[in-house]
Every structure is written in C-alpha cells, then in structure tokens.
Amino acid sequence: MSYCLECPDVLGTFADRSSRERWQRRILRQLQCYRADLLCLQGCESQLAVPACSESHAASEEQQHYRPSSDGSLLTMVLAHFEKEGFGWCAAPDWARSAGQTHVILWLRAKWRALSWHVDAAAAAIHVALQSQTGTGWQFNVACIAASEREEQRAKLRTLRPHLAAPALL
C-alpha cells in the first residue's frame, strides 16, 4: 500500500494539539484497515533528521538506529503502532522538499526480511531490498519517492534505476 501524506507545514495548520492528534489517529486508522504487509508512506510528518532503520542487520552506509520518541509526530505514532504489530521499517527525511517530511517503508517481518537499504539524497528517495521469509531465493526491491510533476518523477527514477532490478515496486 502506498500513501502520499505530503503535508507542508502540517503542524502549523491545526488550531490546537487535539486537532493534530485527531488527524494523526485518523491516518493511523486508515493505514490499519487495509491489513497490508508492505506500506510506503511519502511525506510523513516527523522530526527525523537522518535516515534510520529498525533492522540493525540490514547493511547500509547510512545506518542509524532510531527509536520512536515522544515528539508527537505522525512518524512516531505510526512506528510505535506498527512495531507492536511486527513490522520492520526504514525511513529517510526528504531534504529536497521541506523540513519535517519523511519517506517510510514498512514491512511485516513475518513475511519479509530486509537484506539492505539505501537512501539517495539527490532523488530524495529510500530503497529497501526485501526477501520472502518462506525461503524462496528471490529479492523484492521497494522504493519510496515523492514527485510533484512528471519530469521530477522521471529524474528520480533514473537515479534509482540501479537499485530497482525486477521485481520492484514504487
């Protein structure tokens, strides 16, 4: 499931904290109702400053271990919920767009295992290589990007091409 949450200045649009928390709970309910085993969230509101991943064994030069804090962001709420449900995740801030937006890939650990992950700062994208837990040898490549126009999307896809050998999902 892919969900574009791109919300510029989302924190400034709510009259009070309870309005923002209501919006966050509504988004979380929408994510829960589909029971997907793979989620890509573009433009998720967060305080994340560097790329991070829940899997310490997944190789990446960007690797940071991040624990959801109590910063009140949507990312914190989503990660706290889905980690309890058995999901792994990788996230990276979108430095190209605006502060406070992050791209996130989440996967159900019972079905998928992370082999590696990579962040492409130029494309403002995150890529995760997943493998089925059933023992099959094939690799599934997932990339999460946000683009506001066709040319921007094409440029980002060209940058990501080396990481998206078939089968792949954007």
Image: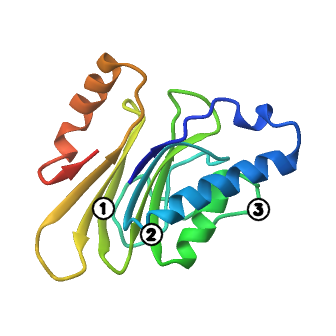
Q: Nearer the viewer, residue 61 or 40?
A: 40
In the picture of the structure, the residue carrying the numbered disc 2 is 88
Residue 146, position as x, y percentages in the image: 42, 33
Distance from Cα at disc 2 to Cα at disc 3: 19 Å
Q: Which residue is found at the position 22% from the left and 70% from the top?
A: 131
In the picture of the structure, the residue carrying the numbered disc 3 is 70
Q: Which residue is found at the position 36% from the left and 57% from the top?
A: 60
Lateral position of residue 116 relative to residue 71, left or right: left
Q: Amino acid at mark 2?
A: Gly
CB contact under 8 Å: marks 2 and 3:
no
Image quadrant in which the N terminus is located: bottom left
Q: Which residue is found at the position 66% from the left and 61% from the top?
A: 77
Q: Nearer the viewer, residue 38 or 34?
A: 34
Q: Amino acid at mark 3?
A: Ser
Q: Which residue is found at the position 37% from the left and 68% from the top?
A: 37
Image quadrant in which the C terminus is located: top left
The image quarter containing residue 38 is bottom left
Say whether disc 1 or disc 3 marks the residue closer to the N-terminus.
3
CB contact under 8 Å: marks 1 and 3:
no
Distance from Cα at disc 1 to Cα at disc 3: 28 Å
Q: Which mark is residue 154?
A: none
User: How many tags in the picture?
Assistant: 3
As helix, strand or loop, the secondary structure at mark 1 comes to strand
Nearer the observer: mark 1 or 3; the answer is 3
Q: Please tell me how crowded label 3 is: few (under 14), some (14-19), or many (20+) other residues with Cα within 10 Å.
A: few
User: In the image, is residue 53 above or below residue 121?
Assistant: below
In the picture of the structure, the residue carrying the numbered disc 1 is 116
As helix, strand or loop, the secondary structure at mark 2 comes to strand
Lateral position of residue 128 relative to residue 134, left or right: right
Lateral position of residue 99 relative to residue 136, left or right: right
Residue 98, position as x, y percentages in the image: 60, 29
